Amino acid sequence: MIDADSLAIFPIDQWIQDGVRWVALNLRPLFLAIKWPVENLLGFNDHILHATPFPVVVALTLLLAWRLASVGIAAFSAISLIAIAMLGVWNEAMTTLSLITTAILFCALIGVPIGIWCARSDRVWSIVRPILDIMQTTPTFVYLVPVVMLFGVGTVPGEVAVVTAAAPPLIRFTNLGIRMVEHEIVEAGLAFGADRRQLLWEIQLPLAIPTILGGLNQTVLTAMVMSVVVAMIGAEGLGLVVLQGLGRLDVGRAAVGGIAIVLLAMMLDRITQKMAEPKSKGASPLLEAVRHLLRGRTVGDRFTEETIPAAAKQPV
Amino acid sequence: MTERLKIENLYKVFAKDPARALQILASGGDKNQVFEKLGQVVGLNGVSLSVPSGAMYMVMGLSGSGKSTLARCINRLNEPSAGRILLDGQDIVPLDEAALRHVRRTRISMVFQHFALLPNKRVIENVEFGLKLRGVSAPERRRRAEEVLSVVGLARWAYHRPHELSGGMRQRVGLARALATDADILIMDEAFSALDPLIRTEMQDELLRLQSTLNKTVLFITHDFQEALKLGTRIAIMSEGRLVREGTPQSIVLEPGSEYVAAFTREVDRARLFDARSVMSEPATLWRGKDGIVVGEAAGGPGFLLDGQERVMGSVSDAQIVHARQTGEAPALEPEHVCVAGSTKLVDVARHYRPGLPIGVVDEGGKLVGVLGVAQMLARIANAPAPQDGSAP
Ligand SMILES: Nc1ncnc2c1ncn2[C@@H]1O[C@H](COP(=O)(O)OP(=O)(O)OP(=O)(O)O)[C@@H](O)[C@H]1O
Ligand SMILES: [Mg+2]
């Protein structure tokens, strides 16, 4: 009988290690270039979130959640933040939040354009799609291996891992959203002489926004999960609280971290989910949400009904 | 009327490389043969037609006959495989993207079956759409959009969103959007097919009303022959990617030319389609005197007494004509008579009909240009050959 272990004649681990070492050595400028903006933006966000006094953070979150989502979600968000503070992990939570917000920014900056590109070219999509498939089926845990080899350990490499893991859903949904735009409407754009840029900005993107926001929601959740996992490569934040708790067999400490993570995750999920939900048929929620923010009142359909009441009575 | 749009030998094969399919078609093969041999779908198979300026040109045919393909080739939403599309004499098939965009922005606009309005924009922004693409300034295009919206009767709905409007109103917005660009050619692909019958009739009337003042060149796709008859100044009938019959509504119903076309014409209400001019016969002189002449149907019956300018002075009964012929005396004149214009539909002629009185067709100056026999009219309405002897069987 042949033994399974006797087949392991090739030093594959050695090869990979050599390969990665070579890449890390020779492509060092590339990784530094990737690391630099991540490091800076993350540092900036982290600084802001920690420097802002606790009541201000709660108040701003309340306002933002109210405008973007609803009163209920705003109340839930405020209570969650207060609870996190009461658990005594406020600083760690702010670190995690800075990891997530930075990741959202990078994902949007990278993911949306790639998604658009995929939507416009079947060839690009046929290349990107299998990559996304692999990335999304890979356990988040496995991301850490190449990241450590190429970027080292710490919070910044952790953030690189978060962005890498969180970008795929946004790419996917952006591509899907644009491709799903009703064919006849796209043709109407072409028939009236839209060029590619106008087609994108006047028709495809506005109509894809609900789907893209759905992708954003997925991205936020993935970023949340990943921001905890990267504690294993030395990133700070709530994940580290749990990890330390486990390491010291301090169940209480680990549980505190866990509860804070759940609260933060639920808060972010509810807000982004509500954003993706169309408020009135046909109106794109993001634009509507921005208007809410700017004008401080419900615009949309109520506006027209107040100002032009007679219109409703006009016969067909 | 000048020729605005001319299509010469247009082919469309849905395939990356249509060369072989075109060869088969050129050597007399048809859509089915191409599909059997190559598995490629033929949309258009050598279509030629010419649309005069100001026409309501109807393209009609069964599902899959290539109507939409034809419409979409004209603004090159479908890229023609071969042939020429002449817009005021200029071929638009070889135009590059920028030139094509210019044509789409300024010369040809389109109305869609399912309206294709932007759901996230207000009605007025939808109407402005074409002007925005063209780069017209915001106040200017808003002014123009308001103007067009009031033309289609939707001024009060300007700041609503499309989903608040009914189907008919949405299509008015679609129409307004197409009119706002001032393009002189309007392509309407089944524009009213998604509307329920009453609204549809209303929109047809609206289009006729608009057309009477705007005088656009309209290419209207429909699979409804009644609609084609009602709106069309000319009708082209398609089958399997070919144009099988082309002409005025009356001429097509009169001479379908093939069983395929005849099938459409069978249910047509002929009394509302045909007018007096299409049935009238040349007045025959029945009696000549020094005060004037009496004319009527060659087969006999009552006639009209005409003055020197061929204007109708009154009618003369059957018996009086016979009497005058025999005695040479002037026939007794009756002031009552029935005269209609050439464009009067037969259904309205029937309303004027009075037993014993002849029916004449007069021009604007009151000159008699033809006479109408009851038997001929009935034969036309029944789609039977006109009786030669003038008497009903
Ligand atoms: N994009 C396409 N790819 C392949 N075949 C097509 C395409 N568009 C149309 N066809 C085919 O071309 C033929 C003509 O289609 P077209 O849409 O012009 O018909 P139509 O007369 O408008 O029919 P309908 O009344 O159903 O709208 C059909 O056989 C159709 O299957
Ligand atoms: Mg069609």
Image (cartoon, grey):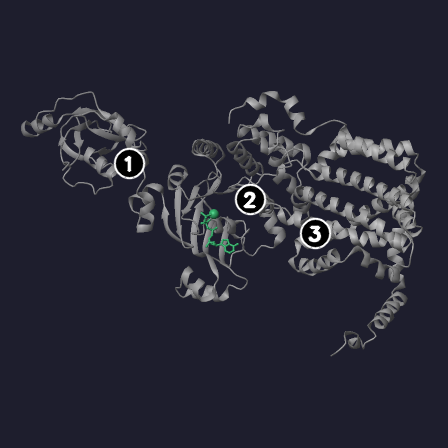
- Dot 2: few (<14), some (14–19), or many (≥20) neighbours within 10 Å? some
Residue contact at pointers 2 and 3, CB within 8 angstroms: no
Location of the C terminus of chain B (image quadrant)? top left
Which residue appears farthest toward the bottom when viewing the image?
Answer: A1
- Dot 1: few (<14), some (14–19), or many (≥20) neighbours within 10 Å? many
Q: What residue type is labelled 3?
A: Arg
**Foreground: B194 or A92?**
A92
Residue contact at pointers 2 and 1, CB within 8 angstroms: no
In this rendering, would B377 be left or right of A277? left
Q: Mark 1 points at which residue?
A: B277
Q: Which chain carries label 2?
A: B
Which residue appears farthest toward the left when viewing the image?
Answer: B327
| Residue B144 can be seen, yes or no | no
Q: Mark 3 lies on which chain?
A: A
Q: Which chain carries label 1?
A: B
In the image, is residue A269 above or below residue B351? below
In this rendering, would A74 be left or right of B246? right
Whether the residue under disc 2 has CB within 8 Å of ligand 1: no
Q: Name the residue under label 3.
A: A172
Residue A183: image x %, image y %?
Answer: 58, 47
Residue B14: image x %, image y %?
Answer: 51, 58
Please tell me whether mark 1 or mark 3 is closer to you in this view. 3
Q: Name the residue under label 2.
A: B107
Residue B269: image x %, image y %?
Answer: 31, 36
